[in-house]
Amino acid sequence: QTLHNAACLASELAAKGYGIVTGGTDNHQVLVDVASQDLDGQQAETVLEKVGIICNRNVLPQDATEPGRVSGIRLGSGAVAARGMGTPEMARIATLIDNAWQHSTRAEVLEDLSRQVVDLCRLFPVYHRQD
């Protein structure tokens, strides 16, 4: 499921106009080029953290202009797969990511997206109670 989730996330983000390094993924990680959306890796990482989505900024092959400035982020699918999320949730996560980046300066939108992330996590808790 981890691999299916990563492939779905890559596909959904590509459909929204984001460059996916290598055109997709064969493992649990998705490397996204955010420069085409007038973002850098640090901006993209920071806004996702504000809404509760954790990622890492990442150097891309073409990054050579300014030390410390990177054009990519790395997203992993292992943690969400461990929670029981599948491809429908990955499509929703891709939409949350896109909305966060597109509305990164609108606090009210980011607050709403944060609530949506929390709601999704509540549907798929880390530990499942067995009564």
Image (tube, helix red, strand yellow):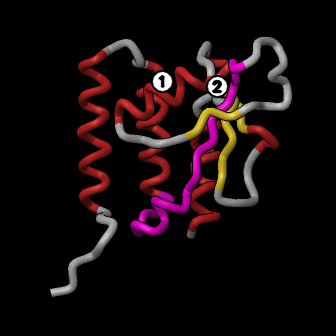
**Residue in the image at 74% along x and 31% along y:** 59
Image position, residue 48 (x, y; %): 44, 32
Left or right: residue 7 versus residue 86 is: right
**The stretch drawn in magenta includes residue 73:** yes
**Residue in the image at 84% along x and 24% along y:** 62
Which residues, given as a range, are shown in magenta?
Answer: 68-87
**The stretch drawn in magenta includes residue 51:** no
Q: Secondary structure at mark 1?
A: helix
Residue type indicated by callout 1: Trp
Image position, residue 102 (x, y; %): 46, 20
**Residue in the image at 24% along x and 39% along y:** 115
Residue type indicated by callout 2: Val
Q: Is any part of residue 96 visible from this angle? A: yes
Query: What residue is pinned by disc 1?
Result: 101
Look at the numbered discs 1 and 2 and tell me whether their residues touch, using CB distance below 8 Å.
yes
- Give the quarter of the figure containing the C terminus: bottom left
Image quarter of residue 6: bottom right
- Give the quarter of the figure containing the N terminus: bottom right
Packing grade of label 1 (10 A; few <14, some 14-19, many >=20) is: many
Measure the C-alpha gap from mark 1 to mark 2. Answer: 9 Å
Query: What residue is pinned by disc 2?
Result: 34
**Residue in the image at 30% along x and 72% along y:** 127
Q: Is residue 66 above or below residue 72?
A: above
The residue closer to the viewer here, 68 or 16, is 68
Q: Secondary structure at mark 2?
A: loop
Image position, residue 18 (x, y; %): 64, 30
